[in-house]
Image (spheres, rainbow, N blue to C red):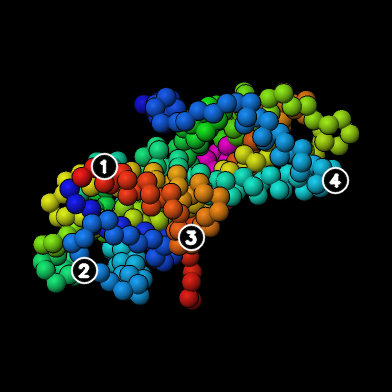
Amino acid sequence: MSSSTKASRIGEELWKTRVDKVNAELVTLTYGTIVAQLCQDYDGNYQEVNKQLEKMGYNIGMRLIEDFLAKSNVGRCANFRETADMIAKVGFRIFLNIAPTVTNWTSDNNQFSLVFDENPLADFVELPDDGRAQDELWFSNILCGVLRGALEMVQMQIEAHFVSDVLRGDDTTEMRVSLVRYIEDEMPPEEE
Amino acid sequence: MTVFSLIIINKAGGLIYQREFQPGLRKLSTNDYLVLAGTFHGVHAITRTITPKLPYLATTPASNTSTTTSSTPTSATALASPSGTTTPIPNTTSTAATYMYPIPGVAATGLDSLETDKFRLTCFQTLTGTKFLLFTDPHMANVEPVMRKIYEFYADFVMKNPFYQLEMPVRCEAFDRNLNGWLRGRT
């Protein structure tokens, strides 16, 4: 069985049995409010908003990973491809009930794309038509941070960013994820 | 089933939680608990280091090897179980190219449990590096599900508490309450 089908099965099972559900509008509206507030606070500086969203996601990811591990009881992934399937088919499934497609691998297996057919965070959203938001704001940028925070806790340094978003008028919503390195040292250097 | 106490050690080897649930073991001073956490962390790291790494292209059947050491006063055995070592290649001079670590392949777990006449210490290390040490009656079966439940409580009431600072001592009342309640319900 491919790691993708296996992951799908695990995700499905966990979603059915272990996950507390919450009203989707609550999530969508809460997240929308946060982004709108940030845009206001940073006075339409969308680069800064992207950065703040990423940072918030990072802090979430570092905590969320323990919930993921405790609930799923999965072991360590054997390689980055397995990690990608785990993120897409288990992680996104249990936290957002979506399963983005893993695609566009580079030949060294260190970079892939997540293509989102649906995105609960962006339901009902239309970006402001100030002529800049369409080009500068990555509305769901919090997700990049979540991945970075979560993977850092399991010894993977990654970089993630959106390359397209249907909110901007693109055909797809796509996030690019690159493995920077495996963090080998188990203990942080304390007294050296 | 008797669960004496629980210790949580962060990934840097610092003690972040210590609670006694049932009497039976002698108490240590706060300082000694800190020393215990640090020492265990070190020993655990060593047991991981001396465990043979997995061959790069290993297909990993779960065959446990065990190393025996003695450390505590009463006949103590320690089991280090890497999950699966197929054909350990004797050539120890081989380079990192042959062995990749911790990924791919399953990382060695290092010290799993330590047993005396009076208690058993079971260690569970999460993939994030946090260690849970559970002191139980040596005859207690099924420590694993208890450990998993404790990890879930930790993920819920510690990690999801937005005011808990990561890697810092755990002072979450809800964690204590739920843990206590659940353990009491099992006895």
In the rendered image, which quarter is residue B185 located in? top left
Whether callout 1 and callout 3 share a subunit is answered: yes
* Amino acid found under the numbered disc labelled 1: Gly
Question: How far separated are the C-alphas under marks 4 and 1?
Answer: 54 Å
Alpha carbon separation for disc pair 2 and 3: 27 Å
Mark 4: few/some/many CA within 10 Å (<14, 14-19, 20+): few
Magenta stretch, main secondary structure class: loop
Q: Disc 2, disc 3: CB below 8 Å?
A: no
Helix, strand or loop status at disc 3: loop
Residue occupying the far right of the picture: A130
- For numbered disc 1, what is the local secondary structure? helix
Identify the residue position indicated by label 3 in the image.
Answer: B167
Q: Which residue is mark 4?
A: A43
In contact (CB < 8 Å): disc 1 and disc 3: no
Foreground residue among B186 and A30: B186
Q: How many marks?
A: 4
Residue shown at 58% from the left, 43% from the top = A146
Question: Disc 1 is attached to a residue of which chain?
Answer: B
What label does residue B185 carry, if any?
1
Mark 4 and mark 1 residues within 8 Å of each other at the beta carbon: no
Q: Nearer the viewer, mark 2 or mark 1?
A: 1
